[in-house]
Image (cartoon, grey):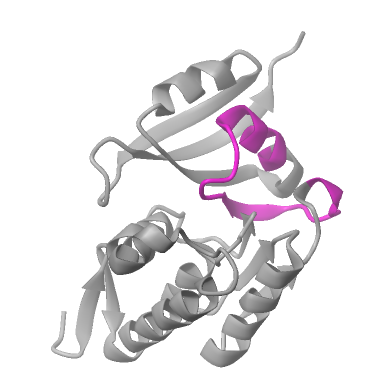
Amino acid sequence: MTEEELLVGGTSVSRETFQKLEQLSALIIKWTKSINLISPNSIAEIWDRHIVDSAQIYELAPSNWVNWVDLGSGGGLPALVIALLDQERRQITLVESDQRKSLFLNTAKRELDLNLKVVNKRIESTDLKNFDVMSARALAPLPDLLTFAVQYLTPDGTAILPKGARFNEELDQAREDWHFDVTPHPSQTNTDSRILEISRIRRRES
């Protein structure tokens, strides 16, 4: 790592990228005053609670991904962070049903010069498919997320899903209806949480 590089959640970034991440943090805080992008209680800890937490999701993605979808993007976490970290500027699609939050996402896209597409629709009502990677942060229980995964991912795609302390319970619930391979990764920001790397998702036959 050179003097001009910094670490964010285990990812080495340039000083320019680091400054853009700081710019994103300021933008999220500014908009949170009028719409609920993040919890007001977490503003003081935005770097660790949201930026670093999002960066570690990017680190777990397969290196050869081409297109990424983030569901229920809300305040753009992790998708906006991923777009800033990805130096190849690959295509990232954000699905968000709330019009005001979609306006924020498009504002961030413009101000930070990001290669992404914002889809202002409900997750269930798009015709999007064939993504290599899917992320969803604080969106829904795991069984529901796997339903979305088979809709959005290629058969070889990977879902990267941060989960809290009850992740084992969610895994047990999901296994009632689904077959999948899973690797739980420790979270850098919460010792009780895990980031679930899930692939080969298929529904159990009744």
In this rendered view, identify the residue nearer to me: 83 or 125.
125
Query: Residue 16, how many percent across, how many down?
Result: 34, 91
The residue lying toward the viewer, choosing from 180 and 121, is: 121
Task: Give the side of residue 83 with respect to residue 188, left or right.
Answer: right
> Residue 63: x and y, percent?
45, 60
Specify whether residue 36 is painted magenta.
Answer: no
Whether residue 87 can be seen here: no
Q: Residue at x 60, y 38 (%)?
A: 140
Is the C terminus in the top left, top right, bottom left or bottom right quadrant? Answer: top right
Residue 141 position (above or below residue 206): below
- Which residue occupies 25% across, 51% down? 188
Q: Tell whether 123 sits left or right of 21.
A: right
Q: Is residue 42 visible?
A: yes
Quarter of the image for residue 113 reads bottom right
Residue at 27% x, 35% y is 192
* Number of disc labels: 0
Please name whichever residue, 139 or 80, is drawn nearer the observer in this view of the structure.
139
- Indicate the quadrant where residue 97 lies: bottom right
| The residue stretch that appears in magenta | 124-149
| Location of residue 33 in the rendering, given as x and y in whole percent from the top left corner | 51, 74
Question: Is residue 20 left or right of 122 when viewed as pictured?
Answer: left
Q: Is residue 138 magenta?
A: yes
The foreground one among 49 and 133 is: 49
Position of residue 44 relative to residue 49, above or below, is below
